[in-house]
Image: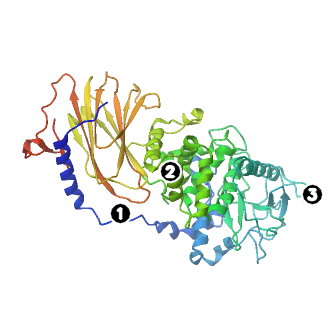
Amino acid sequence: MSKWKMSIKTTVLLAIFLCLISLCATESFPSSEPDPKRMEGINDLIQEIFYKSDQPRQRIDEYSHIKKCATPIIMYALKNKHLLRPENSFILYRPTDPRDQDYYGNVEVLYFDTTHFRVHYTEDNSNGDAVPGSDSNPNTVPYYIKNLASYLEYSWGKEIVTMGYSIINFDGLIGGGLNLIDVYVLNISYYGFTSIDKSNYPYIVIDKDLNGRSSSFDTDPNGILKVTAAHEFFHVIQYDYDDWENLWWEENTAAWMEDEVYDHVNDYVRYLPYKLSNLDLPLDEEPYHIDLFIYGGVIWAKYLSENYGQSIIRHIFERCAIINPPIAKEAIGYILGSYGSNWTDALAQFYIKNLTRDYQEAREGLNYPQVSLTQSVSATEIGNAFSSPLLTIDHLSCHYFKLQAGQEHQKLYVSLAKYGSYPSAVFLADRSNTGIPTKETVDSFFMDTNIALDGFGTSSAYPQAYLIVYNPHPENDNYPYIWAAAFEPISNPPPDPPPDPNQSVPEAFLKSDGGGCFISTL
């Protein structure tokens, strides 16, 4: 592997490139604003959570209709109380707060205490909230409640005792028990959610229909109930650190915590396609049209944990607790620095691992979906050279390009023309004969502007290669770039050296590709 020196070609490409970007460049790169559509339907979403809408209930275990965690919906509603219709103002209160009518309606609400939790429930099914195992005898505790309580206590032991997280602010006697975390079991359309009361103390709501549910990636009949307990309890912990100021990070790490507490369940694998098919969106994106994207972001938390140690997640939250405002991206950058890394290096390895599915838990990694390619380029289809149109890339996102050999033995040249310091790029030469790159079949190289690969061909060492272009800047969007590739048969004599960069460039040296940019011929 050697750097490809093509000074005049690069100079010309960059010159034209800079002219092109001047047409679309602005004085600064503005940060994206939250999509207002997220809040347009907030009242309808609340109605859906509590089955107050006219829409029929969707099966909770159906892959395409997973209702994971309603915390984001509740959080947005609490921060935008002025948008709530009167019939939805009940979410401002705890389910059992004294009011004209609580969430449960006019039924008897029972509770079961453990060391750290008070679980509220009813055996009266007048409003559909009776839990499995109800026998109308208040002196016996239904098995669903006992199971949930044990899963919550186990989560406490793992998250607080073993992993070192802390909870400082307890709610005193609010909800009943002294400094017990209140959990309310209701008939809702999501696995669960965590909210805060008017005194800013968190509480948990869990669906009463999770009994016997598991994902396709485990055989535990109560797997969903277990990971929901771990997930929602971690939301309680998070609130102590950053007041839920980073929705994407809260859900990434709550889904990550599920697998740390209940490693055998692996429900998180179901959400990975939503992320790995959309890595061209920023890590912190919260797209309203891709419901499970933020849960698929568990892969980012898993990458950090596996490569820097499990405690890095806690260190990031601890950093959030001491900065104002508690911005997760700022905390991540700071903590990466304390580990001798940075956004550029960490993201490069992250995007490589996603392509090669190189995660420590091999049995789970084999179930990970392949990333979606931005473009696949075949030497057979394009001839001897190719250049992309002008492309742009947003913060903390990446583009994957595959280059497929078209002859037995070629030399591959790849160049990148970019604006200033961004974006960054990684080049991977892949020895796989199956076309599916793995940790064992790729050789990876950081790439500045140009690179050359010998032995590229259908019968050579590398039948395909990948260019990963990514933007490690935590805020700035729309960085423009162009990338180009050229394929030279090994049997041919090497091309004439390019003209001296101090001389004028002959017109024949430039060739338009019809796409608004230019490529250099060999």
Q: Which residue is mark 2?
A: 337
Single out the residue that lies furthest toward the right. Answer: 139
Whichever of labels 2 and 3 marks the residue nearer the N terminus, that label is 3
Q: How would you rate the neighbour count of disc 1 (Cα within 10 Å): few for under 14, some for 14-19, many for 20 or more?
A: few
Q: Position of residue 161 (x, y in %)?
A: 75, 49
Type of amino acid at the residue the image marks with label 1: Phe
Q: Which residue is mark 1?
A: 29
Q: Position of residue 425 (x, y in %)?
A: 36, 44
Mark closer to the observer (3, 1): 1
Type of amino acid at the residue the image marks with label 2: Gly
Numbered circle sitting on residue 139:
3
Q: Do tag 3 and tag 1 residues touch (Cβ < 8 Å)?
A: no
Residue name at image x 22 percent, y 61 percent:
23
Q: What quarter of the picture does the N terminus occupy?
A: top left
Q: How would you rate the neighbour count of disc 3 (Cα within 10 Å): few for under 14, some for 14-19, many for 20 or more?
A: few
> On the image, which quarter does residue 248 sit in?
bottom right
